[in-house]
Image: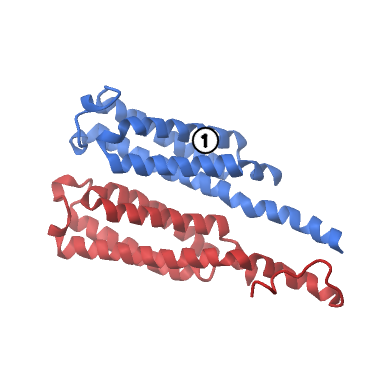
Chain colours: A blue, B red
């Protein structure tokens, strides 16, 4: 009886944690939307930011910043959908992209500190969800 | 209630009845999280309603005027927050049932709301940050623990 109990519950326990991977996927989508908004603001309304782009660590125009943000944002939404679909490569790519996003936002902090901090926080959530729990999705295949 | 949720495998004498009865009891330890998510969703809706009402009736309260806002003016943002807030309260109440539609609606609504709050952030940074944090908490509770309410019924 105790044998059948354990074989019954094992897959159950594994799927119980794949919620984290889905959470990571949704957070990637949210991160992408945040970055897309930032990118559009940088391209079309650069007076919105607190400092001129020459005051940033990487001195490129807000136009360039904007398209980089927007491109990464679209990529994050696509990869997030891939993670939600259970794609393993997307999990890896999502964690790498979140890391890159965090570094970029560290350099972007003076332009809009609160946005950058929020995005970096979401980056960390994505990395945790995908790195700590990514393997569990695999076990259910 | 936590005690009765853990029948140890060595228990004898109850026969075949224990196996089906055990399954719902196991998930109950986590069900609290989705109820928490539901309450947070109602709270978040209330925050949104307050933001919206302030934007409509007391627009001097915010740090920036219309020129510092993205996309809409303060009245537009006020109505948007009010509508999202009302929907969030309704979805939060629906979450208590654990129904699939309520969970999908909650996650979609929280995602939209988080983006809206990000765009509105300059008006009142701390409020918007708090609401974004609540959005993430609701999404977390619903996605990670969402199906356990259904299993518990």
- Residue at 38 percent across and 41 percent down: it is A119
Q: Quadrant of residue A45?
A: top left
Where is residue A46 shown, x and y percent of the image?
Answer: 21, 34
Instruction: Inspect this view and state whether residue B107 appears.
Output: no
Q: Is residue B54 left or right of residue B6?
A: left
Chain containing mark 1: A
Q: How many tags in the picture?
A: 1
Q: Secondary structure at mark 1?
A: helix
Q: Residue furthest top?
A: A59
Where is residue B117 shown, x and y percent of the image?
Answer: 31, 52
- Residue at 35 percent across and 41 percent down: it is A117
Q: Is residue A93 left or right of residue B64?
A: right
Residue topped by disc 1: A95
Q: Quadrant of the image for the N terminus of chain A?
A: bottom right
Is disc 1 surrounded by few (<14), some (14 to 19) or many (20+) residues within 10 Å? many
The one of A132 and A72 positioned closer to us in this rendering:
A132
- Residue at 36 percent across and 38 percent down: it is A35
Where is residue A4 shown, x and y percent of the image?
Answer: 84, 60
């Amino acid at each position: 009886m105790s044998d059948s109990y354990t074989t019954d519950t094992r897959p159950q326990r594994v799927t119980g944690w794949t919620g984290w991977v889905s959470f990571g996927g949704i957070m990637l989508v949210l991160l992408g939307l945040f970055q897309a908004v930032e990118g559009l603001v940088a391209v079309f309304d650069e007076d919105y930011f607190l400092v001129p782009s020459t005051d940033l660590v990487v001195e490129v125009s807000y136009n360039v910043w904007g398209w980089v943000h927007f491109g990464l944002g679209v990529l994050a939404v696509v990869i997030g959908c891939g993670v939600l679909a259970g794609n393993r490569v997307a999990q890896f790519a999502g964690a790498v992209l979140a890391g890159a996003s965090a570094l970029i936002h560290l350099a972007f902090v003076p332009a809009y500190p609160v946005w950058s901090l929020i995005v970096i926080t979401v980056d960390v959530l994505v990395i945790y969800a995908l790195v700590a729990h990514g393997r569990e999705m695999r076990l259910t295949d | 209630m936590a005690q009765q949720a853990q029948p140890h495998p060595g228990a004898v004498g109850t026969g075949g009845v224990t196996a089906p009865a055990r399954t719902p009891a196991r998930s109950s330890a986590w069900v609290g999280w989705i109820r928490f998510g539901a309450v947070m969703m109602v709270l978040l809706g209330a925050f949104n309603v307050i933001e919206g009402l302030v934007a409509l009736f007391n627009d001097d309260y915010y740090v920036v005027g219309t020129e510092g806002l993205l996309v809409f003016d303060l009245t537009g943002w006020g109505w948007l927050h009010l509508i999202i807030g009302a929907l969030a309260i309704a979805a939060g109440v629906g979450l208590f049932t654990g129904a699939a539609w309520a969970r999908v609606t909650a996650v979609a609504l929280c995602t939209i709301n988080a983006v809206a709050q990000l765009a509105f952030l300059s008006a009142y940074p701390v409020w918007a940050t708090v609401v974004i944090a609540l959005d993430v908490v609701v999404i977390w509770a619903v996605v990670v623990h969402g199906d356990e309410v259904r299993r518990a019924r």
